[in-house]
């Protein structure tokens, strides 16, 4: 994962300049220059500034100046210095456990006395002691220009460090909780992005596209044409940044190959004549908002918007990648658990490689011989389609909750959670280098059948049962 602040030098310089003006001169609480690696003496300077921010002397203007100076000091550090800075916040500005215990005892005593006023006062004090000082410090950046974006990128940095510096995890958790509250979907605006949107915003769409890389400005213009739609969630405090965006093609019938949707030479369709909306790319744009889910709300909002604009749309489907399939398949081969094959499939495999059907299948896949050898593609197609259906609809792994099962594939989990069903597996759906590497060129359609979404969602959330079409059921039974 890339360090979000360091990866965006333009934002880094603009933010530092903005906050320099707010921090002002030394008399307003500005900090002296720090060593890039934050030596021991400078760590003392940081502690003093953090405590000054908490004391809040001098009113709002002084508080903003101190916070801006602290932020500029952080931006001036190298990676080692930033980790030491964050370590101070994580270790020294956490909850005072002894104060929490004392406040809890006071609440118990007040409750036994039955005095409502005393109980309320004790509850208030307990709530205050449970709030770590670092949360108050983080909140102060919310009032600064670009402060919310800074905190989002700060969490992105924390996520890159917590594996090797687990002591930073409580700080990351506090920041995640704050961002979850600030980025509630009720605060977000849904915006349609068009060719007339600002150039800087369009450049960010190109940068953040994570599913099908945008190759050129002509490619982007094609994805914004009149038979296409691109929608993004935007936060009022980050109006120039997409949080998550979805690309939609308005077509007739469910599409099975991404090449057709991205073809610059494909004829344009009158969107008013389309009967199907294909969601072919959903990209999270802010690494610092990982784990804060907007995608399910985005799809629902976009479906509502499209239905109002185009009453003729009857089908809402995705054309999705299957990013974990090849990795899972390698594990299946290692365990020798590829399942049964028909006599016709065995015969086709032995015609390409006489070492035996399962050995032939394994060799053709591991060496990419299925792409280059005569008869290789047809020989592997049947077994691979069946294994793909099993991977998407049957295979499970434990999720973040103890004992909670979820689909092995993260994209499948996302759409099944939202109430979609596995509709169709598409052979040769994505023959790009990435598509071949991840999923051997296959893609999948997840169908959002509006009158079945709630039922499908409950079946998957409650029992990890995936809704599947008759076509997929046939593959599973084969």
Image (cartoon, grey):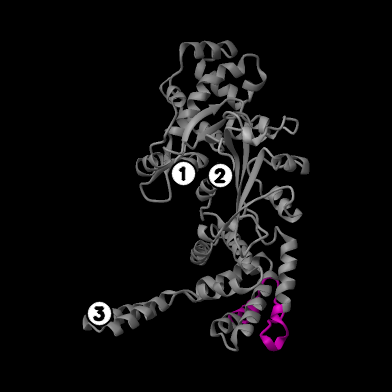
Q: Residue at x 61, y 17 (%)?
A: 376
Q: Residue 233: x and y, percent?
A: 59, 54
Magenta-tinted stretch? 22-47
Q: Which of 292 and 2 is in front in this view?
A: 292
Dot 1 lies on which element?
A: loop
- Say if mark 1 contacts mark 2, CB within 8 Å: no
Mark 3 or mark 1: which is in front?
A: 1
Q: Which of marks 1 and 2 is nearer the N terminus?
A: 2
Image quarter for residue 222? top right
Which badge, 3 or 1, is on the more N-terminal residue? 3
Q: Which mark is residue 111?
A: 3
Residue that badge 1 annotates: 418
Secondary structure of residue under mark 2: helix
Q: Percent x, y for residue 77?
A: 68, 70
**Residue lying at 51% horizontally and 35% vertically, measured from the top left:** 446
Which residue carries the number 2 mark? 308
Crowd tier of the residue under label 2, counting other residues whose Cα lies within 10 Å: few below 14, some 14–19, many 20 or above: few
Answer above or below: position of 9 versus 475.
Answer: below
Residue 170 point in image, percent of width and height: 48, 66
Alpha-carbon span between mark 1 and mark 2: 21 Å
């Amino acid at each position: 994962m890339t360090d979000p602040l360091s990866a965006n030098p333009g934002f880094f310089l603009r933010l530092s300049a903005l906050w320099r003006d707010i921090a002002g001169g030394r008399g307003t609480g500005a900090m002296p220059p720090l060593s890039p690696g934050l030596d021991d003496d400078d760590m003392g300077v940081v502690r003093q500034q953090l405590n000054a921010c908490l004391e809040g002397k001098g009113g709002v203007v002084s508080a903003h100046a101190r916070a801006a100076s602290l932020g500029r000091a952080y931006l001036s550090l190298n990676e080692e210095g930033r980790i030491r800075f964050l370590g101070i916040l994580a270790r020294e500005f956490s909850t005072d456990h002894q104060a929490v215990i004392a406040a809890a005892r006071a609440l118990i005593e007040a409750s036994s006395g039955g005095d409502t006023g005393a109980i309320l006062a004790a509850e208030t004090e307990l709530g205050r002691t449970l709030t770590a000082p670092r949360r108050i410090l983080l909140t102060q950046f919310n009032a600064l220009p670009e402060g919310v974006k800074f905190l989002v990128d700060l969490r992105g940095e924390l996520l890159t460090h917590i594996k090797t510096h687990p002591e930073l995890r409580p700080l990351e958790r506090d920041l995640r909780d704050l961002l979850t509250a600030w980025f509630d979907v009720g605060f977000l605006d849904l915006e349609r992005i068009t060719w007339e949107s600002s150039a800087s915003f369009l450049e960010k769409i190109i940068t953040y596209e994570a599913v099908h890389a945008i190759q050129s400005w002509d490619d982007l213009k094609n994805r914004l044409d009149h038979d296409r739609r691109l929608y993004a969630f935007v936060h009022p405090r980050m109006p120039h940044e997409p949080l998550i965006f979805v690309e939609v093609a308005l077509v007739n019938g469910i599409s099975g190959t991404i090449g057709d949707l991205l073809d610059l030479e494909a004829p344009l369709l009158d969107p008013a004549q389309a009967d199907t909306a294909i969601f072919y790319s959903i990209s999270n744009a802010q690494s610092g908002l990982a784990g804060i889910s907007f995608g399910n709300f985005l799809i629902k909002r976009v479906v509502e918007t499209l239905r109002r604009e185009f009453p003729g749309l009857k089908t809402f489907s995705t054309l999705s990648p299957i990013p974990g399939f090849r990795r899972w398949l390698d594990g299946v081969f290692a365990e020798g658990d590829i399942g049964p094959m028909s006599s016709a499939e065995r015969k086709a495999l032995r015609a390409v490689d006489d070492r035996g059907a399962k050995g032939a299948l394994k060799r053709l896949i591991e060496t990419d011989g299925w792409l280059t050898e005569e008869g290789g593609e047809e020989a592997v197609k049947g077994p691979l389609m069946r294994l793909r259906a099993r991977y998407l609809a049957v295979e499970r792994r434990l999720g973040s909750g103890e004992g909670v099962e979820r689909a092995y594939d993260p994209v499948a989990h996302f759409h099944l959670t939202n109430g979609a069903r596995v509709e169709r597996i598409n052979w040769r759906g994505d023959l790009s280098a990435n598509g071949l590497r991840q999923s051997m060129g296959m893609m999948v359609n997840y169908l959002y059948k509006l009158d079945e979404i709630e039922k499908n969602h409950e079946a998957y959330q409650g029992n990890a049962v995936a809704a599947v079409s008759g076509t997929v059921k046939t593959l599973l039974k084969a």
